[in-house]
Amino acid sequence: MQQKELKDYYKNTLAEIMNIEEKIKELETKEDVKEYKSLTSNLRTKRADLEGLKKAIDYSIMNECNHLYVLSKEKFSDIRYGIPDRYYPCCIKCGLDSSVATKYYDELNQKQKTMQLILSKNDGLPKGRYLKDDDNYTISCPSSSLAEELYKEIIRNNPSISDDDTEIMFREKLKQRQKVKYKNR
Ligand SMILES: [Zn+2]
């Protein structure tokens, strides 16, 4: 494009912008549009509130939990350590998972970020009970999500179960799962 053409094009675009701005200004005097603007701004604020509340609820659940820990096998995403995967304690009740401490902050979802906050405030994992297997070793589970799933199954039918009975039932449920997995191989 020649310089003159460019300048004309610039002038036209500027005129179009001013025209659009004029139309927007006109629309903004209409009641419907005013309401639309106020509603969208209100919606943004409420969504931010909801996000904040969700964080606060997650924090309070994990902070007030009487943790029941098992070991779960987690992939090691952090190459700094050069280890493929390892077992980390995680709580079957609230999902607090100590493997988040080895991950980069940017990789974590919101709940995991809250977990990191709890771990750093407690200088590691908060106190809790470690569930034992038949040989009195801490129970190992293939993943923290399976651990949470089994716990949910347990409390669905026994909402006020004691920690002792949870330990027995968790042990049994995990054994059944592993048997099924072995059979289906
Ligand atoms: Zn917990």
Image (cartoon, rainbow, N blue to C red):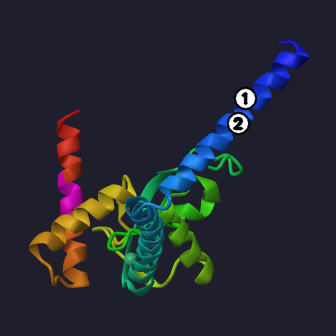
| Residue under the image location 58 percent in, 52 percent down | 107
Image quarter of the C terminus: top left
In the rendered image, the vertical position of residue 35 relative to residue 118, given as above or below = above
Image quarter of the N terminus: top right
| Residue under the image location 70 percent in, 36 percent down | 15
Residue that label 2 marks: 15
In the image, which disc is placed on residue 12? 1
Amino acid on which the number 1 mark rests in the picture: Asn
- Residue 172 percent coordinates (x, y): 18, 63
Q: Main secondary structure of the magenta part?
A: helix
In the rendered image, the vertical position of residue 153 relative to residue 62, given as above or below = above
Q: Secondary structure at mark 1?
A: helix
5 displayed left or right of 170: right
111 displayed left or right of 183: right
Q: Secondary structure at mark 2?
A: helix
179 displayed left or right of 48: left
Q: Quadrant of residue 103?
A: bottom right
Ligand 1 shows up in the quarter that is bottom left
Residue 137 is one of the magenta-drawn residues: no
Q: Residue furthest top?
A: 1
Disc 1 residue crowd, few under 14, some 14–19, many 20+, Cα 10 Å: few
Q: Marks 2/1: CA distance? A: 5 Å
- Residue 113 percent coordinates (x, y): 55, 66
In the rendered image, the vertical position of residue 32 relative to residue 45, given as above or below = above
The magenta region covers 172-176
How many numbered marks have been drawn onto this rendered protein structure?
2
Amino acid on which the number 2 mark rests in the picture: Ala
